[in-house]
């Protein structure tokens, strides 16, 4: 997700928090913000547990590679292709 998307989603959650605080049901929040009732309920529980700061964006997600160094080395060998290892073609 880009920083813009994170910011937009945070605005939606915070606006939904206003509705929740005013007494809107999960169904009303879900309909208004075009999310699932499960998301609306998750926001409600997060708001109750930690307030608005909990609904703030934590920035774009970061995925880390789960491969071991030896596995990464194998991928580099494969990426070089068979021609790099003396074969006449890439078959």
Image (cartoon, rainbow, N blue to C red):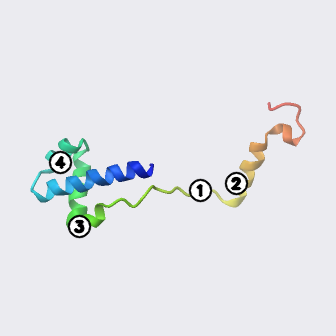
- Cα distance between the residues tagged 4 and 2: 45 Å
> How far apart in space, not on screen, are marks 4 and 3 (Cα)?
17 Å
Between residues 10 and 47, which one lies in front from this camera angle?
Answer: 10
Q: For the point 78% across and 47% down, which residue is it?
A: 77
Location of residue 87 in the rendering, given as x and y in whole percent from the top left corner = 88, 35
**Residue 73 spot, x, y in % from top left:** 74, 54
Of the two numbered discs 4 and 2 in the rendering, the one whose residue sits closer to the viewer: 4
For marks 3 and 2, give the CA distance: 43 Å
With 68 as the anchor, is 25 left or right in this view?
A: left
- Disc number placed over residue 51 in the picture, else none: 3
Residue 42 versus residue 60: which sits nearer the camera?
Answer: 60
Please name whichever residue, 8 or 79, is drawn nearer the observer in this view of the structure.
Answer: 8
Quick one: SS at disc 3?
A: loop
Q: Is residue 62 left or right of residue 6?
A: right
Q: Which comes sooner in the sequence, label 1 or label 4? A: 4
Pointer 1 local density, CA inside 10 Å: few below 14, some 14–19, many at least 20: few
Category of crowding for the residue at label 2, using alpha-carbon neighbours closer than 10 angstroms: few (below 14), some (14–19), many (at least 20): few
Q: Which residue is mark 2?
A: 72
In the picture provided, is 42 more to the left or to the right than 28?
right
Residue ID for mark 1: 65
Q: CA distance from mark 1 to mark 4?
A: 37 Å
Residue 69 against residue 77 in the figure, above or below: below
Q: Which type of secondary structure does the marked residue at label 4 adopt?
A: helix
Is mark 1 in CB contact (under 8 Å) with mark 4? no
- How far apart marks 1 and 3 lie (CA) works out to 33 Å
Q: Which residue is mark 4?
A: 29
Marks 1/2: CA–CA distance? 9 Å
The mark nearer the N terminus, 3 or 2, is 3
Rendered location of residue 31, percent (x, y):
18, 41
């Amino acid at each position: 997700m880009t920083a813009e998307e994170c910011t937009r989603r945070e605005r939606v959650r915070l606006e939904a928090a206003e509705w929740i605080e005013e007494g809107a049901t999960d169904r009303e929040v879900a309909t208004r913000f075009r999310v699932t009732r499960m998301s609306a309920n998750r926001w409600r529980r997060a708001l109750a547990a930690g307030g608005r700061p909990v609904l703030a964006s934590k920035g774009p997600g970061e995925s880390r590679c789960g491969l071991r160094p030896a596995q990464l080395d194998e991928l580099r060998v494969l990426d070089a292709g068979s021609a790099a290892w003396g074969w006449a073609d890439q078959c």
